[in-house]
Amino acid sequence: MSSQVYIRVATLADAEALAVLAEQTFRATFGEANVSEDMDAYVHEALSLGCLLAELADSANTFLVAFIDAAKQPVGYAKLRTGSTAAVQGAAPIELQRLYLNDGAIGQGIGAMLMGECLEHAQSNGHQTVWLGVWENNARALSFYRRWGFEVVGEHIFQLGADSQRDLIMMRLISSALTE
């Protein structure tokens, strides 16, 4: 029997599970390549329960959460935020600020499902451009985004604790063809 993936918009009731997943996936993705003090500082600053409650309450943000079957804990999530940066020249932009899966969900197509939902959400809300920042050393993410038609249009600094890291800014236009 195959598993069924469900993706829905997160609510304030999802904040605790989302905070756990956000910290777990961020540490799993970047922990080995960064010092623990910088990781701890970023998690406290950006992924704490208080931060996620505030982000969930902010209408500029939309969180999508992915579940397998009837699980109560999400296995992945994405965060979209209305707005732009100087490097993005496309019309009606929205930022894909986060897209993370727990280790057990990687390789099951859930990342592609989340990306598809992000693009559909953006398009249905009148956005014509999706952009994101991705760490220049995150080869897996860079490959994933390129498969989805994102192209590098600039760079910016991502502050991880005391470490200033270079993120590549990537963007793609939204069209009627929303698949990779």
Image (tube, rainbow, N blue to C red):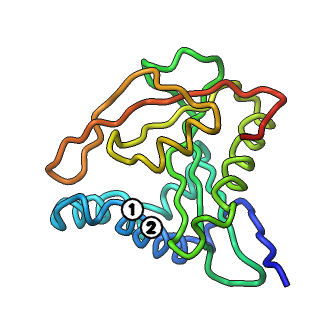
Residue labelled with disc 1: 29
With respect to residue 134, does 128 lie above or below? above
Give how far across and how far down residue 44 sits, in percent.
Answer: 29, 65
Location of the C terminus by quadrant is: top right
Residue at screen point 82% across, 79% down: 2
Q: Is residue 177 left or right of residue 148?
A: right
Pick the front one: 145 or 169: 145
What residue does disc 2 label? 25
Q: Is residue 99 left or right of residue 158?
A: right
Q: Closest to the observer: 143 or 126?
A: 143
Q: Amino acid at mark 1?
A: Thr
Residue at 61% in and 68% down = 12
Please, what is the three-letter code of the amino acid marked with disc 2? Answer: Thr
Quadrant containing the N terminus is bottom right
| Residue 89 percent coordinates (x, y) | 54, 14
Q: Quadrant of residue 114?
A: bottom right
Residue at x-position 61% and y-position 46%:
59
Answer above or below: position of 63 versus 144.
Answer: below
Q: Secondary structure at mark 2?
A: helix
Task: Count residues near mark 1 (Cα–Cα under 10 Å), then give few for <14, some for 14-19, many for 20+.
Answer: some
Residue 108 falls left or right of residue 168: right
Picture quadrant where residue 149 is located: top right
Question: Disc 2 to disc 1, how far (Cα)?
Answer: 6 Å
Query: Percent position (x, y) of residue 35?
Result: 16, 62
